[in-house]
Image (cartoon, rainbow, N blue to C red):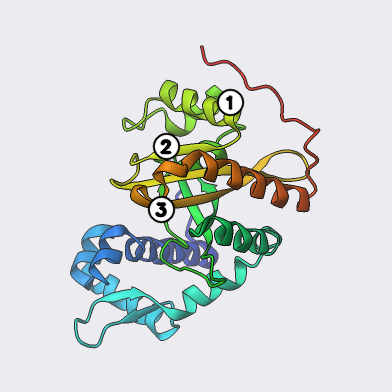
Amino acid sequence: MARVKDTPSASRGHGLRRDIDLLEALASDEAQNAGGLGVVRLAQLVGREKTQVSRALKVLAAEGIVERDPDTLEYRLGWRLFSLVARTSESRLVRVAEPVMHALSAELEETSHLCVLSDREVLTLLSLSGHSFRVHGWEGRGVPAWQTSAGRVLLADATPDELYVRFGTAAEMPVQELWALIQEARRRGYARVSEEFESGLVGVSAPVRDFRGRVVAALNISAPKSRLGERLDTAGRTTAAAAGRVSALLGWEPRRTPPTAARLT
């Protein structure tokens, strides 16, 4: 069979994929902890030649998508990318949830987070403190769904087969154990974790449903165990009530109960 020649659009798509790989590397924990990465390390992470990576980074830097530290010469995500993310996150979900989150954070005196599911990770769309300002430390970051309370409520609608497809190869959390934790969260109305994701950190999450009753997001409260540990269940019930208010604003009526979950065999 004759080889199909790359079309201009296919070449552009391939180039975009490689640029996205670079952005993913710059969004990694390694890059965030180091404050940036150099061309050599980025080339290692994405499996490309150093000269190719250097050229791509110069183009991205010229557009403000990445920026280069003049002292260390290392690259980090740029102002324009964050500006684009901030604008696109102003969706109806975020607009509806934001005032409820302000009230939740003020009541519990802790930071609240609005989270969604992205493949096998939980992604934070919005973080708010009780003092009515945004907290950017978690926004845009992904964390493993099986380690977090948010992940367990975001997976509330998943069937056992869907869990196996999504997490069957993840050695960190057996699917049967994850299923049991999800069902526990469904019965309680919120999920809770204590130092499972990070030592000294506890959290609770509750599901946000759309007008069809599907879980589309999670409201989360996370804080040091020394501060929140003894009132975790109180925080869980308060968060569940707040998530219910957001769900109602999205058109969900509580009497429309979700379908009964399948059994794990």
* Residue 35 in view in this figure: yes
Residue 85 image offset from top left, x and y in percent: 54, 69
Which x, y percent locates residue 235? Answer: 53, 45
Q: Is residue 47 visible?
A: no
The residue lying at 48 percent from left, 79 percent from top is 80
Per the image, label 2 sits on a secondary structure element best described as helix
Q: Nearer the viewer, residue 101 or 247?
A: 101
- Is the residue under label 3 in contact with that under label 2 (CB below 8 Å)? no
Identified by mark 1, the residue type is Thr
Q: Position of residue 45 (x, y in %)?
A: 25, 58
Instruction: Please tell me which residue lies in front, 94 or 105.
Output: 105
Mark found first going from the N terminus, 3 or 1: 1
Judged left or right of residue 135, residue 35 is left
Disc 3 to disc 1: CB gap under 8 Å: no
* Circles 2 and 1: CB atoms closer than 8 Å: no
Going by the numbered disc 2, the residue's amino acid type is Trp
Measured in 3D between alpha carbons, the distance from the residue under mark 2 to the one under mark 1, in whole angstroms, is 15 Å
Q: Say the numbered circle drawn on residue 159.
A: 1
Q: Name the element at disc 1.
A: loop
Residue at screen point 50% across, 56% down: 124
Residue located 52% across and 50% down the image: 220
| Name of the residue lying farthest toward the bottom | 70
Rendered view: 174 above or below 135: above
Numbered badge on residue 146: 2
Q: Residues within 10 Å of mark 3 (few under 14, many from 20)?
A: some
Residue placed farthest to the front in the image? 230
Comparing 68 with 207, the one in front is: 207
**Residue matched to label 3:** 223
Q: Is residue 84 above or below residue 114?
A: below
Q: Amino acid at mark 3?
A: Ala
Q: Quadrant of residue 72?
A: bottom left
User: Of marks 2 and 1, which one's residue comes earlier in the chain?
Assistant: 2
